[in-house]
Image: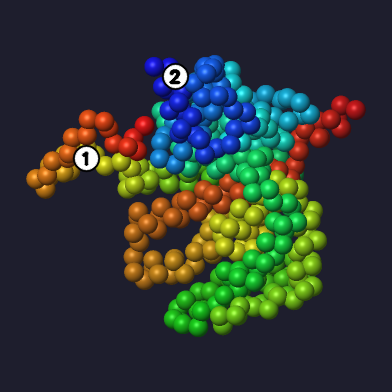
Amino acid sequence: MAAVTSPLRACRGILKELRIAKGSDYRNTLVYKHVLEQFRRNQFCRARMDALHAARTYLCLLTSTRMHLRLHERYHGRGDRALEEVAGLVGLRLPTQPGGKGWET
Amino acid sequence: MMLRNICRYQRQFGQVIWPFSFPQGQHVPSLSTHLQKAKYASGTTERKKFYENVSIAQGEGGLFEINLDKRKLKTPGGKLFTVPNEALAIAVATEWDAQKDTLKFYTMHLTTLCNTALDNPTQRTKEQMISAALKFLETDTICYRVEEPPGLVELQRNEWDPVMNWIEQRYNVVIGSSSNIMGPQIPEETKETFQQHLNSYNLWSMTGLEYVITQLKSLVLSFGLIDRHLSVEQAVVLSRLEEEYQIQRWGNVEWVHDYDMYELQARTAAGAMFVHLSSESTAVKRKILHD
């Protein structure tokens, strides 16, 4: 298996994702300490390859979740305009329902 | 006012089966039970983040729990949320910690997998999952080859054949591929070999593996990922080979292609992590060391 990412790059990548997610406080989190401990511990051949794969997998999880969320907010989030405004664009008005719509809680 | 809010919560989350119920309108439950119940939103509403700090704790039998402020996390089915080792607990805690003002459950893949393993809402056994996985082999993505266009034929050959060779060698089986609609004929010995291998998985790992297979639409690619022969990114590219081919020809549309790709990567990565972490148990190791 071709190791595209070195352990150092994987570690840096994860820490960067944590900084994006948590802000300046990221060093105080459990996951930060756990990640650093894992990287320091695994020095031997077989465990190292396994650990590297695990690190790359976690990095992929963090990055992909963030990118997916970003695209979701950008393209699938709520519209910027209120419903009334959208109706107003085509010259219509929403009917008034004093009792509220049936499906709104 | 309080009573109306209580009824509103009950209606919203009525579809979830709670382990206890109380008569409507007669007695007022405490605020903390409400916050626990209201934790998992229905499809249309979003829950606000109702906690500041996330921490983990080791409880009974060496299992780990997640605490949101002072409250213990529970599954949608009402069970106490427990995981077998610390690494998985930390990863789940990080998912909860990363939430901003509203809780976006569709980004919390590890939590979802744990909930599925703990609640097992469809009551499936390990044997059922194994036979479903083996059945999937008959419709495995990388066993289905097209006959045209020649660019895609070649791409499938160049990218999928090596993985096929790897798995046939690694497990000493014959799978083969096919370009007709009937698919490949999987020999019984092959199924038996895989069945034996899958039997060594525990229920949690099997839940994770089933999830990965569903995402990648391929048992072969899933094995490649779990056995660490492929990275998540590689497995996802191979799973989406035809899409990638079309994207190269016709161009990329961010809000469809990238969106799908990132979602698939996130879910697959979570599934793989879940399998690996469920296969080890630091709780057991700790007990042995102390004896």
Is A100 left or right of B223, judged from the image as shown? left
Is B214 left or right of B7, judged from the image as shown? right
Whether residue B34 can be seen here: yes
Residue sitting at 74 percent across and 52 percent down?
A: B126
| Residue B176 in the image, given as x and y percentages of width and height | 66, 77
Q: Quadrant of the N terminus of chain B?
A: top left
Both on one chain, marks 1 and 2?
A: no
Disc 2 marks which amino acid?
Leu
Instruction: Determine which quarter of the picture holds residue A95.
Output: top left
Instruction: Determine which quarter of the picture holds residue B218.
Output: bottom right
What chain does badge 2 belong to? B
Indicate which disc residue B3 carries.
2
| Residue A100 in the image, given as x and y percentages of width and height | 27, 32
Give the alpha-carbon distance from disc 1 to disc 2, as whole Å. 30 Å
Instruction: Determine which quarter of the picture holds residue B204.
Output: top right
Q: Nearer the viewer, residue B169 or A69?
A: A69
Residue sitting at 18 percent across and 35 percent down?
A: A96
Q: Quadrant of the C terminus of chain B?
A: top right
Q: Nearer the viewer, residue B219 or B37?
A: B37
Residue sitting at 73 percent across and 25 percent down?
A: B59
Whether residue A55 can be seen here: no
| Residue B41 in the image, given as x and y percentages of width and height | 47, 35
Q: Nearer the viewer, residue B39 or A43?
A: B39
Q: Is residue B34 above or below residue B104?
A: above
What chain does badge 1 belong to? A
Which residue is label 1 attached to?
A: A83
Disc 1 marks which amino acid?
Leu
Crowdedness near tag 2: few (<14), some (14–19) or many (≥20) residues, C-alpha within 10 Å: some
Q: Is disc 1 in contact with disc 2, using a CB cutoff of under 8 Å?
A: no
Residue sitting at 55 percent across and 43 percent down?
A: B109
Crowdedness near tag 1: few (<14), some (14–19) or many (≥20) residues, C-alpha within 10 Å: few
| Residue B53 in the image, given as x and y percentages of width and height | 53, 21
